[in-house]
Amino acid sequence: MQWFYRWLGNKIRHAREDNEPTIGLVRPRKLISARESEELNTEPITFKMFKASGGWAIEFRQYDSRNDRMNANLYVVNDEHELGKHISQIITMEALKR
């Protein structure tokens, strides 16, 4: 039973030491969540992909808070073209429009 009291005493002592301010030791900083960041105040771009006959229809939507309106663009990619390449080009083009 003596080991338990020793263990409990060590835990209490370490807890008290952690709460006391120390000079010269680096304390871990508080982690900032993504929602607290000032850089994420922009509106997101969302897109949906629909399978169409002969290819894909890709719809991009973005809310413009300055004009209070929703902007939507529709792109069509044929089955003959590489889908991933065209999606990356469309995303780049939409991001540059911002």
Image (cartoon, helix red, strand yellow):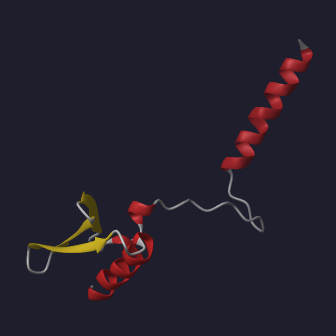
Q: Dividing the picture into quarters, in which one does residue 6 lie? A: top right
Where in the figure is residue 2, as x and y percent of width and height? 91, 16
* Spot occupied by residue 52 in the image (x, y as percentages of width and height): 23, 60
**Picture layout, residue 55 above or below residue 51:** below
Which of 32 and 92 lies nearest the eye of the viewer? 92
* In the image: residue 18, left or right of residue 73: right
The image quadrant where one finds the C terminus is bottom left
- Image position, residue 45 (x, y; %): 28, 70
**Relative image position of residue 38 (x, y in whole percent):** 38, 73
- Along the viewing direction, whichever of 88 and 67 lies nearer the viewer: 88
Q: From the image, which quarter does the N terminus lie in?
A: top right
Q: Measuring 56% from the left and 59% from the top, which residue is drawn there?
A: 30
Number of numbered discs visible in the structure rendering: 0
Q: Quadrant of residue 55?
A: bottom left
- The residue shown at (69%, 61%) is 27
Q: Is residue 48 above or below residue 2?
A: below
Residue most extreme to the right: 2
- Which residue is pictured at 30% across the width and 72% down the height? 78
Closest to the observer, 60 or 63:
60
Residue lying at the far bottom of the rendered structure: 96
Above or below, 35 against 92 in this view is above
**Front one among 30 and 69:** 69
Relative to 11, 89 lies left or right:
left
Residue lying farthest top? 1
Residue at x-position 75% and y-position 66%: 23
